[in-house]
Amino acid sequence: MFVRSCSLSSWSAAGAALVARAPANSPPLSSSPASTPPKPGPRSMASSSAGAGAGRVCVAVVGDVHDDWILDEDTKALHFLKPDLVLFTGDYGNENVQLVKSISDLQFPKAAILGNHDCWRTHQFSEKKVDRVRLQLESLGEQHVGYKCLDFPSIKLSVVGGRPFSCGGDRLFRPKLLSKRLIKRAPGSIMQMKPASSRYGVDDMAGSARKIYDAAAGAPEEHSVILLAHNGPTGLGSRMDDICGRDWVAGAGDHGDPDLEQAISDLQSETGVSIPLVVFGHMHKSLAYGGGLRKMIAFGTNRTIYLNGAVVPRVKQAKDSSPAVSFTSERDGLEGLGSMAPTSRAFTTVDFFDGAVDKISEVWVLVSDSGAELEEETILYKRPREHM
Ligand SMILES: [Zn+2]
């Protein structure tokens, strides 16, 4: 099937300035418990035209990577797709610091969030050594949007992150990475207490929902907001093949994040924030035990579209090619590794027009030494033509 690359934007990626703007309550990278700020007042409901005037904008989603990322190859593919913004849904590897560093080196405007696999072994920030969660966060810097708002003024979009490290379901995953509880300074010492090395100050789902809400409510009025989370919200179905459906137990169930649903619901009912798109991964497209394929798109109220980008594995050896060079996860993401066998690489592209989603496609880009070309496109959504 033939398609164009998403190249209709009138401006170049090189000019995509971003403004990192954590809300006032967002803790800095160095640990310090956050105080709870007053809830922002509702902004004008008249701002429903958020994003209007931005023209055509293309966003490329890189779903759960799971070690399938090579900077050179994916850069070739992205130069072909020409997105204005690249979003990463997390699970880069199992704390694959080197790979996350290579993603941070990608020369496109971007935003990312860490998933449950990105804290595979680390349960809390270390007091004594630099742990691998910290290294990943430091690599991504302001582009890690967990509980933060990252503004892209030239395309009138803000990306707001959900709860980092999510594993889905109704319990916080890795609560010590999220919390503000006190911990013992040293084993056996009951007197030496100090704040845990927490970046987020979140202890429960309600507090998490509030952090997401606050970050989104602080977006500029003229911007549309994309919510970027590792896992999607509850409320989108409980069948195995639903967008966040549990696929590893016979009874299925809704495995969404309740805090994300709460935040979206509150934002829609209390503010004028325009949320045309909620992007996430975690629940893979291919269902467990060969159970078929997951629905990767869902439609909510207020014209919000929910998109699961977790096409896993996202890299395949190209048809009719010689065997691919084998890389270990330690070497994934390194540049200059020489000639590569052609690969097909998955992205999900989202075209916006004046702040509203116009088209969504799963695309596979064939990348070889000679360049990149479109191999396949599956259109997941196309906005109906409205009567004039
Ligand atoms: Zn995950």
Image (tube, rainbow, N blue to C red):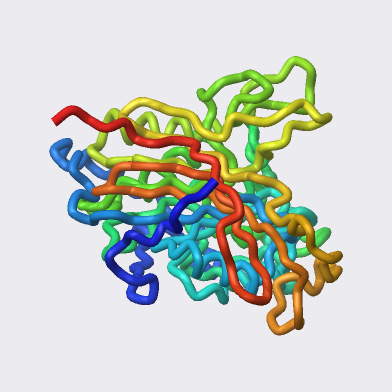
Point out the residue furthest to the top here. 251
In the image, residue 323 above or below residue 54 = below
Q: Is residue 72 left or right of residue 359?
A: right
Res. 53 image quadrant: bottom left
| x and y, in percent, of residue 123 in the image | 74, 53
Q: Is residue 169 left or right of residue 37?
A: right
Q: Could you tell me which residue is drawn at 79 percent across and 22 percent down?
A: 249
- The answer to whether residue 218 shows anywhere in this view is yes
Q: Position of residue 40 (x, y in %)?
A: 27, 44
Whether residue 135 is visible, yes or no, is no
* Rendered-image quarter of ligand 1: top right
Residue, x 51% and y 33% (percent of image)? Answer: 297
Where is residue 214? Give x, y as percent: 36, 46
Q: Above or below — where is 285 with respect to 76?
A: above
Q: Which residue is pictured at 81% across the width and 71% down the height?
A: 330
Q: What quarter of the picture does the C terminus occupy?
A: top left
Q: Examine the rendered structure and indicate whether residue 299 appears above or below residue 134.
A: above
Asked which quadrant contains residue 137, the reply is bottom right
- Comparing 368 with 47, the one in front is 368
Q: Position of residue 219 (x, y in %)?
A: 29, 52
Q: Foreground: 82 or 91?
A: 82
Depth check: 13 or 257 in front? Answer: 13
Q: How many marks?
A: 0
Q: From the viewer's perspective, tell me whether residue 336 is left or right of residue 376.
A: right
86 vs 262, nearest the viewer: 86
